[in-house]
Amino acid sequence: MESYKQEFIEFMVDSQVLKFGDFTLKSGRKSPFFMNAGGYVTGTQLRRLGEYYAKAIKENYGLDFDVLFGPAYKGIPLSVATAMAISELYGKEVRYCSNRKEVKDHGDVGILLGSKLKDGDRVVIIEDVTTSGKSIEETFPIIKAQADVEIKGLMVSLNRMEKGQSEKSALAEIQEKYGFGACAIVNMREVVEYLYNRPYKGQIYINEELKASIDAYYEQYGAK
């Protein structure tokens, strides 16, 4: 496993963004783990988060693109932090763009924040986590309505590796439906592999009991 992935797993735990226990998801599923990117709240956390996204984007899609699109609302700080990290790490300038939930009819009018989209732009979409793929169903037509752009791919922080609207994972469904890549900084298999019975700062985060709960969850909801 790449070192930045190991660091990112520790970073999620340290930031209390990845938690283990009993959680009810928006989908109604009972899950033994929960990831909430809204937990990244400090300048240091956002700077590091942008760096991990930047490294994963470079590894999976390269840097030959023009715009980072972060869907409202959580995608807004992600796109800003990652655009800054790409500039600092690689000397590459990319623009950030996000959508508003409501169209603004005065001043900076329209549905977009940040850069406008232009014909020929190559776009990477950036989100926190995708469980069902419904967010892309909303985001894709918004982007395509603004300009004739090429979407190079989607990058999320964690691939939960569970069924989307079919037996496949949400990321696999997105790739199949829209024809662009869908990747994550890390997936849950890597998280479990790294944290299982491994002491981190004096604590075991995934012990035998929790590992059994995660395995049972994937027996029921794991993607084929």
Image (cartoon, rainbow, N blue to C red):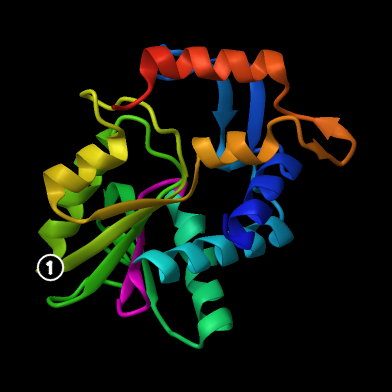
- Looking at the picture, does residue 71 appear above or below residue 52? above
The residue located at (43%, 71%) in the rendering is 58
The residue located at (41%, 14%) in the rendering is 219
Q: What number of labels is visible?
A: 1
Magenta: main secondary structure equals loop
Q: Position of residue 31 (x, y in %)?
A: 52, 17
Determine which quarter of the picture holds residue 101.
top left
Q: Is residue 223 visible?
A: yes
Residue tagged 1: 147
The residue located at (56%, 33%) in the rendering is 35
Q: Position of residue 143 (x, y in %)?
A: 19, 57
Q: Mark 1: which amino acid?
A: Ala
Q: Position of residue 82 (x, y in %)?
A: 50, 66
Report if residue 209 lies within the magenta region.
Answer: no
Determine which quarter of the picture holds residue 148.
bottom left
Read off the magenta span. Answer: 61-74
Q: Position of residue 168 (x, y in %)?
A: 25, 30
User: Is 177 or 147 nearer to us in this picture?
Assistant: 177
Q: Secondary structure at mark 1?
A: loop
